[in-house]
Amino acid sequence: MKQLTTLQLNNLVDSALDTLKKDRDKEVLRRRGGINVEPQTLEQIGQDLNITRERVRQIEKAALSRLRENSNNKHEFSTATSEFIVKKGGLIGLSSLSDEISIDKKLEPHAVFLIKINPDFDYIDRNDHYSSMVADASMFNSDKVKLLHDNLLQIIKGTAKPSKFDNIYKLIDGPHSIETLRELAKSSNLISELDGLWGLATWPEVNPRSIRDKIYLVLKRTGRPLHFSDIASKISTLAANPKRVTTQAVHNELIKDKRFVLIGRGIYALAEWGYRSGTVADIIEEVLKEEAAPLTKDEIVKRVLARRQVKTTTIVLNLQEKPQFKRVNKGVYTLEKK
């Protein structure tokens, strides 16, 4: 549909408010809703009108109730809103609705007011967990949305890793459409999406915030160790929070975080890949302790290279020169007894 103009939305709001008999009721709704004014608190309005904040709340609630019973909601905005709610399976985020109907941000208060006075809709106000949504009143209310959001969070948490939304949807019981659940996830402050993968907003893979999170994401996606300068370059190309960082800043964070392991000259890997920190001699010693028996030079080299990116000659020199290693046969080494 074509964009609703400021004049059209103002006319729809004015027409609804004109059905109220008291000017005070109209004023309270305008000021509380931020319709052509800055939205005001119950306290602010109460002080101006010389009434208590509780009385302001009562006036607002009663006036909206009267409008839901008596207003004419047969107009272009309500029709379009209904169509998009149906398209999304009964629930749509306010921001998504504004995009679909092409409502200017400054006119969103008008849209919210028209939604609140339509008995076919239920306006789900924003809170710490999610932003504002609009629902088919015959399908959802605030309590049902909260329960569904809690369920969605638990399912995502249970996956323990970012997943495609289709896979998350398969794990949720109930008749809800995938469009409904996607709208709920998009409106959630606790769920994030990056490059088609969804997860908890606390997961750096889908919501990298700090440099360390971005380092982790780059290494995780690349799937192999990288030099810190390459990591810095890749951070600036991330789809989420792209930001150019210095190689020094990246190097500093790599050193501080135990998730990252230095495995070569300036080359870092994720500890979760099985790499270990320490000198080459430390790694050789760890390998021999794990085996608890002598190993051939070739086997030692193979196991050390699985944990560190160094030259083979470096490993061999350590075997030959470090006093903690003892050759027990040709090309076979063990730990020197202490």
Image (cartoon, grey):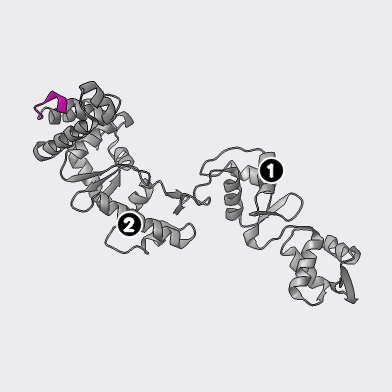
Residue located at (67% from left, 47% from top): 256
Give the structural element (helix, strand or loop) at label 1: helix
Image coords of residue 224 (percent x, y): 65, 57
Is 22 within the magenta? yes
123 or 337, nearer to the observer: 337
Query: In which image quadrant can residue 337 be found?
Result: bottom right
Residue located at (52% from left, 52% from top): 205
Q: Left or right: 239 with respect to 142?
A: right
Instruction: Give the CA distance from mark 1 to mark 2.
Output: 43 Å
Q: Nearer the viewer, mark 1 or mark 2?
A: 1
Instruction: Give the extent of the magenta segment.
Output: 20-25
Q: Which residue is mark 2?
A: 178
Q: Are marks 1 and 2 in contact (CB under 8 Å)?
A: no
Q: Amino acid at mark 1?
A: Asn
Q: Closer to the N terminus: mark 1 or mark 2? A: 2
Mark 1 is surrounded, within 10 Å at the Cα level, by few (under 14), some (14 to 19) or many (20 or more) other residues, namely few
Query: In which image quadrant can residue 232 be found?
Result: top right
Q: Which residue is mark 1?
A: 252
Q: Which mark is residue 59?
A: none
Picture layout, residue 241 above or below residue 45: below
Residue located at (60% from left, 46% from top): 212
